[in-house]
Image (cartoon, rainbow, N blue to C red):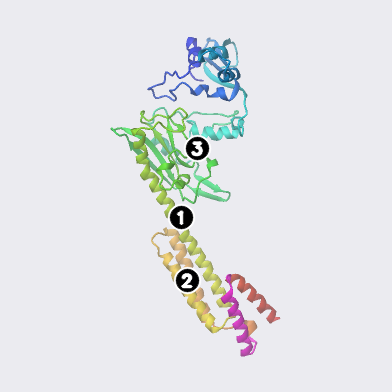
Amino acid sequence: NGIGLGGQDFVKRLTAFGVSQKRGKQQRGFRGVGRLAAIGYCQALFFRSRTGPGQPIRELRWDCRYLRSSLRSSDFQGTLGDAVHEATSHHTLTLAEYPERFFEVELRAVVRHGKDDLLSADAVRRFVGQVAPVPFSPEFRYSGEIDGFLSDVPTPANLHVFINGEGPVYRPHRDEIELRPGMADAADELQLFTIPAIDGGVAAKGWVLHHAYLGAIPRNLGVRGLRMRSGNIQVGDDSIVESAFVESRFNAWAVGEFHILDSRIIPNGRRDQYEQGVHLANVLNHLAPIARDIGNRCRLRSQYRQLMKRAENLGIEIENTLAVLQQGAVTTATRSSLISKLERSLAALEKIACNPLLMDDDAVTVHERLASLRRKLARAEEKEKSASSLGRMTPQKRRAYEDVFSLIYDCASDVRGAKELVDRVLARIKH
């Protein structure tokens, strides 16, 4: 339902190369080549438009196969203008089902390329959701805050795009990031940034979504990496500012976008990067400390997870050693050694529980487990008795078994497995 294109402009503008009336304006595109990209992907390309009620429907057809073959052929002697003239035809149509004003593009007989993503509705939906100026999902709780912060971005658009009648297509951001099946990372902080221009004003505005930084985000989710947008259309991909990170791998852990507002920062012809210049360098220089902060968060969260994992492993190790102590099947010397080992492990666990890095909830959890394990050790120390199967034996025979069991525990790399073996032996002795 766009305003359409009619009159002499219809053919003139749609057959021109490198001519655009958008230069210097707050509009998408300015090189005059984007609409012609489809020539490489189909056999025939159609543009249709009408500017208002009672106006004719104009149609321009490109014979893409003829144009490609002409430009490749050594026998073709004409100019680019001659090739375009031969490859295009203009018609006026009368079709009742079309709206009063519109602009439409049709690619007919699409040529298969690689994985055939151009004809995959899912692939197109993922691409549009990441690149096009479509709105955030209503399921994304930070959407209102981001939209409010970016309300002064020129022409934000937020188009409603439907694919095969299904839609609208939303941006891929959600409150949770599924790193792998059964493991999700929740967004917990939104940080907003305004980057100044070199000579005053604003060069860019952006946001970063912080989370637990559990690892690299899968590319197929469409949210990983700090990204850049111009006119609310993505430029490049998730690796466009990877060089801003001291450790480039941490870019894949990040989620964020920066909208370029400085008109002197211009996307290149492929829209996979920006033209180099001092104004782009200024933005990248301001992105460096942001990327450094993300890298620090990644390392700190990694250290935190290692700390909690160490606490969990210590707890399991203490529980297993306590089980051996409560079993009562080792020598007095081994028993003393186990108690000393338990005291060292409990001291290590207490050190973790008192670590200032721990968040309040985790600190409480570790302290509670520490107290529980200490009570279990105190009860085990009070009950200095042999296993019931050994209690009925003569002292000499009992000491022989205790020596063997102590040797098993000394040689075992898996205390839990060793205890299960000793339990089976005690069960057989009992019967």
The residue that disc 3 covers is 138
The residue that disc 1 covers is 302
Q: Hey, which residue is sitting farthest left in the picture? A: 199
Where does the C terminus fall, quadrant-wise?
bottom right
Image coords of residue 402 (percent x, y): 60, 83
Q: Categorize mark 3 by other alpha carbons within 10 Å: few (<14), some (14-19), many (20+).
A: few
**Region rendered in magenta:** 391-414
Depth order, front residue of 130/407: 407
Q: Residue at x 42, y 40 (%)?
A: 241
- Side of 112 relative to 364 (left or right): right
Q: Categorize mark 1 by other alpha carbons within 10 Å: few (<14), some (14-19), many (20+).
A: some
Is label 2 in a helix, a strand or a loop? helix
Q: Label 2 sits on what residue type?
A: Ser
Q: Label 1 sits on what residue type?
A: Ser
- Check residue 157 for magenta coloring: no
- The residues bearing labels 2 and 1 have C-alpha atoms spaced at a distance of 23 Å
Residue 398 in the image: above or below residue 67: below
Image coords of residue 35 (percent x, y): 51, 22
Q: Which mark is residue 358?
A: none
The residue that disc 2 covers is 345
- The residues bearing labels 1 and 3 have C-alpha atoms spaced at a distance of 31 Å
Q: Residue at x 40, y 63 (%)?
A: 355
Residue 243 in the image: above or below residue 366: above
State which quadrant residue 286 falls in: top left
- Side of 264 relative to 391 (left or right): left
Q: Nearer the viewer, mark 3 or mark 2?
A: 2
Is label 1 in a helix, a strand or a loop? helix
Q: Earlier in the sequence, mark 3 or mark 2?
A: 3
Is label 3 in a helix, a strand or a loop? loop
Q: Label 3 sits on what residue type?
A: Pro
